[in-house]
Image: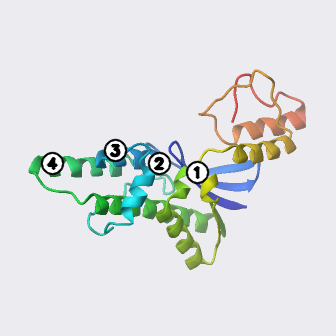
Amino acid sequence: PFLCLVVSGGHTHIVRVNGYTDFQVIGRTRDDAAGEAFDKAARAMGFAYPGGVYIDQAAGRGDPDRYRLPKPRVDGAPYDFSFSGLKTAVINLLHNARQKGETVDIDSLAASFQRTVCEVLTDKLCAAARAYGCTTIAAAGGVSANSGLRAALEQMCRAQGWRYFAPPLSLCGDNAAMIGAQAYYEYQAGVRAGADLNAAPSMDIAEGFAQARAQRAFGVPSRPAGSAV
């Protein structure tokens, strides 16, 4: 088993991977995903879309201690994420500065924002890994290309003596290789579907595999028509 941090424009999940078709979602975002927060904060700072890469570049030139930003928490859900308040704090800081005629150090604001996001992600991931006894950590999704996050995850795992795996930068974004790899494991697990299969982006990650196991055990359909993981 290993613990995977899935961070992208649409998802921020901590997933315990018991097997390639056996997943347990431990934490998830309650509002904006990490990548969405990067893009919205970047737009407020004047960067083009998608903005994550521009914040990453600007952060390398800035002072991460220049601006203090909040780290929102979700009461009663220690492994869940909330980035809406952090994004709003950046927007309000910029808006208030404009109203007062003050200049904002955009590079340092980007650095402060990036470090805050990375600290939230690594703090919750580290706590989940300890609680669930996982000593192998992986990262996936577009935000896993962020240099600050990659460095923070490497530092965390090195300090804890854990193994850490991350995709090469060329495979952090959407690509056919990750789809084909998962398709292989789904096929090996007996997951099948007809030509009427359609996307269901809100389906739980484990639902399709549970249906596939039921099909093998009891001969029932593996997926409802028109749905997919």
* Tag of residue 163: none
Residue contact at pointers 2 and 1, CB within 8 angstroms: yes
Q: Quadrant of residue 58?
A: bottom left
Q: Amino acid at mark 1?
A: Gly
Ranked by sequence position, the earlier of labels 3 and 4 is 3
Q: Pick the residue in front: 229 or 151.
A: 151
Helix, strand or loop for disc 1: loop
Ranked by sequence position, the earlier of labels 1 and 3 is 3
Q: Which residue is mark 4?
A: 98
Q: Amino acid at mark 2?
A: Gly
* Tag of residue 43: 3
6 in relation to 150, above or below: above
* Tag of residue 141: 1
Ranked by sequence position, the earlier of labels 3 and 2 is 2
Mark 1 burial class by Cα count in 10 Å: few <14, some 14-19, many 20+: many
Mark 2 burial class by Cα count in 10 Å: few <14, some 14-19, many 20+: many
Q: Quadrant of the C terminus?
A: top right
Q: Position of residue 184 (x, y in %)?
A: 82, 45
Distance, label 2 to label 1, CA atoms, is: 9 Å
Ranked by sequence position, the earlier of labels 4 and 2 is 2
Helix, strand or loop for disc 4: helix
* Tag of residue 35: 2
